[in-house]
Amino acid sequence: MSSVKISNNMLERMPVYLNYLNALPKSITNISATKIAKALGLGEVSVRKDLAKVSDGGRCKLGYRCEDLINDIENFLDVKSKINAVIVGDGELIKILLNYQGAENSGLNILAGFDSSCTKQWNSGEKMIYPLEQLESFCTDQDINIGVIMSPIKEAQEVCDRLVRLGAKAIWNFTPVHLNVPEHIVVQSENITASIIKMRMQLKEKAEVS
Amino acid sequence: MSSVKISNNMLERMPVYLNYLNALPKSITNISATKIAKALGLGEVSVRKDLAKVSDGGRCKLGYRCEDLINDIENFLDVKSKINAVIVGDGELIKILLNYQGAENSGLNILAGFDSSCTKQWNSGEKMIYPLEQLESFCTDQDINIGVIMSPIKEAQEVCDRLVRLGAKAIWNFTPVHLNVPEHIVVQSENITASIIKMRMQLKEKAEVS
DNA sequence: TAGATTGTTAATCGATTAACAATC
DNA sequence: TAGATTGTTAATCGATTAACAATC
């Protein structure tokens, strides 16, 4: 079950709702789709449809109980079940993601980092960073679901191949490189450059209007 | 002119093309939409339409001259014209973006960083990081287009307000907070949590199929 | 001419929005 | 009852895909 069909767009809105709901003061116990829509600048009907997909706690006149809605969304997203990840890349970058609270909260359990330019293991806050050579020996004992790639461009594809070989089912790609993977592997690419360009184009459009 | 209408999706594909083309070996002088589509796992017709929107260099049988196509895309995206940005947030995070080459290449000219938890200015590689108090005095001399927010959640909205007051026309938001801004301000939010959840859901779907 | 390619026009698909009925 | 809200059905919009004509 749980096979409610969900669009990518809806999926991206879910964490936004969750974040908004969690930030509400404790004194607010009920919330309507209308209010959420207005607060987040979204379409009222979109929000209502989204919420209806993940919760049946909606009551006429009252809306949803905040607590229940948070729970329903979390259940739907299944953030409580942890999945394992390792990060490969530059030590400083790794350090930031390793200690990023949001990752934990989304159910991502980052086990360790691996830096190609480091020769000794070191402790970055709570988690360890090892030399890249140790990737294989570390992973064989572990069940790795997600491999995070923050490597230099030239190493990205090779690192990707290694992670896939070690059993990663998904690759979270922070490099601008297009990664070639077997068909059954999920690739999620973050594209900082595309974000900058999107902003620039929007700025330009607004400038043209005025 | 230049008012070719462009969808958000297309805009996101553009930097991907650019990156792919730039990575091609020098020996390849011509490339077809078909080949690009195959290499990047995109629809053939999509790519052809995208390219047709930004370039008229397509030749039957030959495709596009790589050099020309790169040029046409760059022109379309207008990455050569620089726009100014400042970053506010944690020093270590700032440092990474400050020295990120991709930002420069996309025409983003980051002037400086501002850290609420630092009391003295320091030099992070090429650029300076100042105490947050100095944001106003620094910006009044400068023409700021984009304000980048990497602050702790609690400070995000306040920092946003300050940046808007100082003339930022766009806010690049790396916090999970929904920012309230005047209507004419562009907000681009990066949502790490949404990315994790998207990956997780895709993994789950694949698991269900098999 | 045949084949590879471009670019366009029409068809399909999916997401958002509008309209409305149902309920407390 | 009136009003706020939910949730659904139909209409609109936009993007992708399919089919095809044009060209070198």
Image (tube, coloured by chain):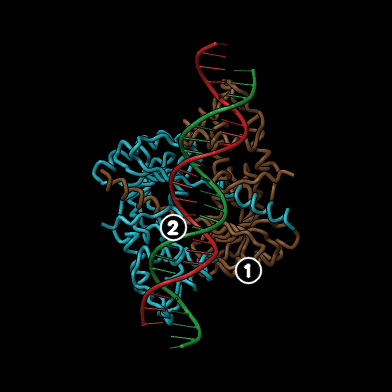
Chain colours: A brown, B cyan, C green, D red
- Which residue type does callout 1 highlight? Asp
Classed neighbour count for the residue bearing mark 2: other residues with Cα under 10 Å, few (<14), some (14–19), many (≥20): some
Q: Contact (CB < 8 A) between labels 1 and 2?
A: no
Residue B140 is tagged as: none
Question: In the picture shown, does residue A139 fall above or below C15?
Answer: below
Q: Which residue is mark 2?
A: B10
Residue A161 disc label = 1
| Disc 1, SS | helix
Between disc 1 and disc 2, the foreground one is 2
Residue A193 in view here: no
Q: Quadrant of the N terminus of chain B?
A: bottom left
- The amino acid sitting under disc 2 is Met
Q: Is residue A172 left or right of residue B24?
A: right
Residue in the foreground of this view, choosing between B200 and A49: A49
Q: Estimate the x, y position of residue A207 in percent, counting from the top left.
A: 28, 47
Q: Position of residue B111 (x, y in %)?
A: 32, 51
Occupied quadrant, residue A1 = top right
Q: Is residue B55 left or right of residue A121?
A: left
Q: Residue B154: horizontal and vertical position, in percent?
A: 48, 33
Q: Residue at x 37, y 69 (%)?
A: B70
